[in-house]
Image: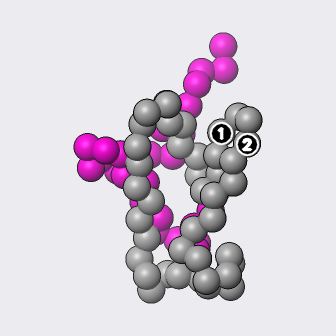
């Protein structure tokens, strides 16, 4: 599992190759979203090669903007 920390107002796109789609994972949807007090979880229908892209078109790395543990 990978995580990306986004600030209020940040936008992102989740991309994956259709060939990697695993329909049995979450039914016939491409993704599923769950909301919590502390944030959201986005689960994709692809188990490999998922890219999270920011509003400028840059691919985000795992742990993007993760708060320090100080």
Q: Is residue 47 visible?
A: yes
Relative side of 29 to 24, left or right: left
Q: Please, is residue 53 above or below residue 29 in the view?
A: above
From the image, tell me which residue sits under label 1.
39
Total labels: the figure holds 2
Which residues are drawn in magenta? 43-70
How far is disc 1 from disc 2 in space, using C-alphas? 5 Å
Are discs 1 and 2 less than 8 Å apart at CB?
yes
In the rendered view, would you say 10 is above or below 34?
A: above
Q: Position of residue 19 (x, y in %)?
A: 45, 86
Q: Is residue 70 above or below residue 39?
A: above
- Residue at 49%, 30% in the rendered image: 7
Q: Dot 1 surroundings within 10 Å: few (below 14), some, or many (20 or more)?
A: few
Q: Nearer the viewer, residue 34 or 50?
A: 34
Image check: 3 left or right of 37? left
Above or below — where is 59 with respect to 17? above
């Amino acid at each position: 599992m990978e995580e990306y920390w986004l600030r209020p107002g940040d936008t992102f796109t989740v991309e994956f190759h259709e060939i990697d789609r695993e329909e049995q994972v979450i039914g016939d949807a491409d993704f599923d979203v769950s909301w919590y007090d502390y944030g959201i979880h986005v689960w994709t229908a692809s188990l490999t090669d998922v890219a999270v892209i920011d509003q400028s078109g840059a691919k985000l790395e795992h742990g993007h903007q993760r708060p320090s543990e100080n």
